[in-house]
Image (tube, grey):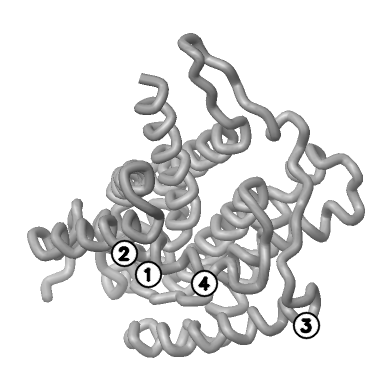
């Protein structure tokens, strides 16, 4: 029972990390059909924001709390600049967005090397998040992974409420369902796109802050994560937030189980094979997006 619970919690914690990373893509890719390969570098920006703040704020706990909104603003601003300078001209050409943002990601990686150096750097975790919580039966859960799980669930709840209850959320859903009809109805689609990109990129920055609790950070950390995030969004269903939530935790549990039974490399292969098999059976993903398009 102890081993089973340990692997289950490990899988859930891996899923929480995947979910945090994929939340921003669920907006920029799922909602706007933009293949943003620079999303991983926005994660990196959030992680380095935490590192920079810890150089000026001595308390690790205070710096972490400050880093969450600051990283959201930093990564969100980077996303707005990318959308305004490049993406705005490529909304009807998703493959071109892949090539352009891939080039941007390489430039941002080199910029990080020039500013912070090539070696990975380590941030300090708050003392409250360095230990474990003991449960009945000799079970333990890591505080840092519990914090990431809570952060991921809070981000999902906030994003869901914003999309369903706020005027901005209704405008975003209208643009997703039919951009042309939303435009002739008086919705400023360009402003909605800019705001959506800001929120999606800002969530990537929050994910970067969370990742500083799990290990060192470096210029290529985003590249190692972006493919898994795209898989979560695609398998969950393009534009479907609930699908991303379910798939993130499912893939996390599958990977943790595979790592326990075999090795990390074999577990990655198992996850990839499972994804390919699922998409062969259901290529549209777990959920499909309802639109008002007549095409």
Disc number at residue 232? Answer: none
From the image, tell me which residue sits under label 4: 223
Q: Residues within 10 Å of mark 4 (few under 14, many from 20)?
A: some
Of pointers 3 and 2, the one earlier in the residue sequence: 3
Would you identify the image quadrant in which residue 217 lies?
bottom right
Viewer-side label of 1, 4: 4
Q: Which is more foreground, mark 1 or mark 2?
A: 1
- Say whether disc 1 or disc 4 marks the residue closer to the N-terminus: 1
Q: Residue at x 49, y 83 (%)?
A: 101
- Asked if the residues shown at circle 1 and circle 2 are in contact, with their CB atoms under 8 angstroms apart, the answer is yes
Q: Quadrant of the N terminus?
A: top left
Residue for badge 1: 32
Check residue 176 in the rendering and tell me which mark sits there, or answer none.
2
Per the image, label 4 sits on a secondary structure element best described as: helix
Residue at which label 3 appears: 114
Among numbered discs 3 and 4, the one appearing first in the sequence: 3
Measure the alpha-carbon separation of dots 3 and 2.
39 Å
């Amino acid at each position: 029972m102890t081993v089973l619970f340990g692997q289950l919690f490990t899988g859930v914690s891996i899923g929480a990390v995947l979910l945090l990373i994929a939340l921003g893509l669920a907006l920029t890719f799922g909602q706007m059909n933009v293949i943003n390969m620079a999303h991983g570098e926005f994660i990196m920006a959030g992680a380095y924001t935490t590192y920079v703040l810890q150089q000026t704020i001595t308390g690790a706990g205070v710096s972490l709390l400050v880093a969450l909104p600051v990283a959201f603003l930093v990564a969100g601003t980077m996303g707005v600049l990318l959308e305004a300078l490049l993406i705005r001209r490529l909304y009807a050409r998703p493959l071109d967005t892949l090539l352009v943002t891939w080039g941007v990601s390489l430039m941002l990686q080199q910029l990080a090397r020039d500013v912070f150096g090539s070696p990975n750097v380590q941030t300090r975790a708050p003392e409250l998040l360095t230990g474990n919580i003991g449960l009945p039966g000799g079970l333990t859960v890591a505080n840092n992974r519990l914090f990431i799980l809570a952060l991921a669930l809070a981000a999902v709840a906030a994003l869901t409420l914003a999309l369903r209850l706020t005027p901005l959320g209704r405008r975003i859903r209208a643009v997703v369902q039919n951009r042309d009809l939303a435009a002739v109805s008086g919705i400023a689609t360009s402003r909605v796109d800019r705001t959506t990109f800001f929120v999606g990129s800002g969530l990537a920055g929050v994910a970067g802050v969370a990742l500083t609790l799990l290990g060192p950070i470096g210029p290529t950390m985003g590249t190692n994560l972006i493919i898994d995030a795209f898989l979560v969004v695609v398998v969950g269903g393009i534009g479907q937030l609930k699908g991303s939530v379910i798939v993130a935790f499912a893939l996390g549990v599958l990977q943790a189980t595979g790592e326990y039974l075999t090795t990390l490399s074999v577990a990655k292969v198992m996850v990839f094979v499972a994804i390919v098999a699922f998409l062969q059976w259901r290529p549209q993903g777990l959920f499909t997006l309802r639109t008002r398009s007549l095409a």
